[in-house]
Image (cartoon, grey):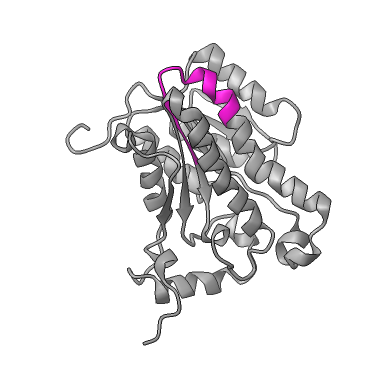
Amino acid sequence: MENGRIDMKGKKGLIVGVANEHSLAWAAARQFRDAGADLALTYFNDKAKPFVEPLAKQVGAEIFAPCNVIRQGELETVFESITEQWGRLDFCLHSIAWARTDDLHGRLTDCSAEGFAESMLVSCHSFIRMARLAEPMMSGGGNLTTLSFLGAEKVVDHYNVMGPVKAALESAVRYLAHELGRSSIRVNALSAGAVATRAASGIEHFDELLNETIKKAPLRRAVDADEVGRAALFMASELASGITGEILHVDAGYHIEGMVFH
């Protein structure tokens, strides 16, 4: 802490999942950089690069590389670059999720085996792969954080296949925390509330979910991306040194509400 602020000077962090300036991963990147951390950022493909590259420059990213986790070797190449340039890693933020449009907009009952497998590979197993690649680079301990959503715990209309996939991701957080704890590597997830991002735009009737949050959440409002970003910074910092295997809700308290009658 420095003047009441979290100090991350000298810390090295990888952020995967920045798509544009509205991304939760971008809000986190700004918080990490403002705290003094050195960053590595990735972009999905050549089409996404023009949207992400100016952001990477804005936070002075020392490493900027493509990362489509389905493409053979791309994630491994990112970690090779980090090894060559930094030789270590202190924290990772995983903020990627994907599902076929038909599976995301259709019933889980009708989800294809191929679509379900692809969604699990991108949204869940990629975090496990990141943990495996990061482990030898975190010899002095570190932090891995991923992003989840309430649909992992409860049925959320129109979230469909992503509900079971995020549930698997949250379970993976607990198992990874158990396995990596002996190496002082902490593993957590942020269950973010409804925030208008590119990913959220793929969910049908997302505006209804946003309105319901404002109506039902104890704080009577939705959260913004910066609040999620600050939570990511906290989780990566020494202030959270005793926290692992945790699913931290950043949703204005929406997750605690059941049927509320007024």
- 64 above or below 252? above
**120 and 64: which one is in front?**
120
Residue at image position (54%, 24%) is 134
- Image quadrant holding the C terminus, namely bottom left
Question: Residue 253 at what x, y percent from top left?
Answer: 37, 64
Q: Is residue 228 magenta?
A: no
From the viewer's perspective, tell me whether residue 115 is left or right of residue 182. right
Percent from the top left, x then y, of residue 168?
Answer: 62, 49
Q: Is residue 130 left or right of residue 143?
A: right
Q: Where residue 102 sits: x, y (%)?
A: 78, 61
Q: Is residue 152 visible?
A: yes
The residue closer to the viewer here, 65 or 120, is 120
Residue 237 placement: quadrant:
top left
Q: Which residues are magenta?
A: 131-145
Can you see residue 90? no
Q: Is residue 137 magenta?
A: yes
Q: Which residue is at 41% across, 23% downward?
A: 141
In the displayed structure, 90 sits above or below 19; it is: above
Residue 82 in the image: above or below residue 58: above
- Depth check, front residue: 73 or 154: 154
Residue 88 in the image, given as x and y percentages of width and height = 47, 17
In the rendered image, the quadrant that contains the N terminus is: top left
Question: Residue, x 53% and y 18% (percent of image)?
Answer: 136
